[in-house]
Amino acid sequence: MSRRRDRLALATRGSRLALTQAETIRGLIETAHPSVTVELLAVTTRGDRDGRPFRSIPGKGLFTSEVERAVVEGRADAGVHSAKDLTAELDEGLALVCVPARAVAHDVVIGGRGESGEERLASLGPDAEVGTSSMRRRALLAEKNPSLRAVELRGNLDSRVDKVARGEVAVAVLAAAGLERLGMLGDAAPLDPNWWVPCPAQGALAIEGRADDEWLRELLAPLEDAAARTEVTCERAFGARLEGGCSVPLGCLARITQGAVVATGFLGHPELGRALRDRASGPATQARAVGAELAEAILAAGGDEILAELEDASYPEVAEP
């Protein structure tokens, strides 16, 4: 490595899931570099402090800005994020230094009856309440079954699962990766990601650092996963072209197949049930271009009209939990 250090400070949100993810990264780094001690710096983000519905909180980076500030100010060498929380454009001077191997990307349904998530949602009666804080999931539900009622579901994963158990909502739709990392998947039923297209970069972790920190890049090189980097690059390019934050109900899932990246994109409206889907593919080395091409196809098919409707409705920028 370009210069020797024996300590590395990682900034992270202070939630149980975020700390678990950061502990995983710490373990990987200390295994690859036994002489390096990794310290965790837990910070409280704006999204953690503000109890309003996510869609009511203005601004970007609800769960990342304070972590990034710790890196910029030198209190931490790097920040560990759920990659889906990152804004489309990183702050000046910062870079996505490492993308480790990705976990599962699909959503799941907690509660209800049936082997698949689709069966559980189909078994619900009219006006049944489905817990979610995601605009994307609201749009998917509006398209699939407009008789269901999407209701705000905030709090950590433990409290969300508890709300289903207590009957505060009939079911909840959540990301499988977070539940899996906390050992809470239980009898959660998966949703088909080819139709229930996940949030861009869902299931992936991202380590963000200062763009000029070559020591950090060398240190983290053993953790980098080429397939995960390619998928995240493609999906983030799709999201960046359409909006730049997760308030817009969009999804993208990229997969590597025989040296090519194949991506499915989704854009919908959370109330009108309007939705668009398309697919694009190309060399894995051109992942960013494939994501942008897919976004252009969605726009050309009427996505620009959906975006205009969303803008008129004044939905603010939020992060998808």
Image: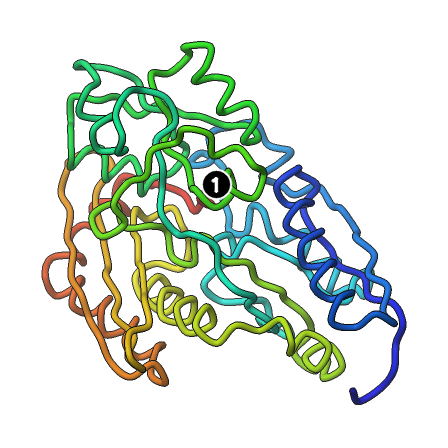
Tell me if residue 250 comes above or below residue 241 in the rendering: above
Q: Is residue 176 above or below residue 237?
A: above
Answer whether residue 308 is visible to the viewer in this image: no
* Residue 24 lies in quadrant: bottom right
Residue 180 relative to residue 11: left or right: left
Nearest the eye: 191 or 250:
191
Q: Position of residue 7 (x, y in %)?
A: 87, 67
Q: In the drawing, does residue 289 fall left or right of residue 228? A: left
Q: Is residue 318 visible?
A: yes
Identify the residue under disc 1. 321
Q: Of helix, strand and loop, which one carries label 1?
A: loop
Residue at x 61%, y 73% (from the top left corner): 97
Residue found farthest to the bottom: 2
Which percent across, then down, holds residue 103?
48, 55
Expressed as whole percent of the image width and height from the top left, the position of residue 158 reads 57, 26
Three-letter code, disc 1: Pro
Q: Percent from the top left, x then y, of residue 227?
A: 43, 72
- Please report the residue visible at 75 percent of the width from the left and 59 percent of the height from the top: 10
Q: Quadrant of residue 134?
A: top left
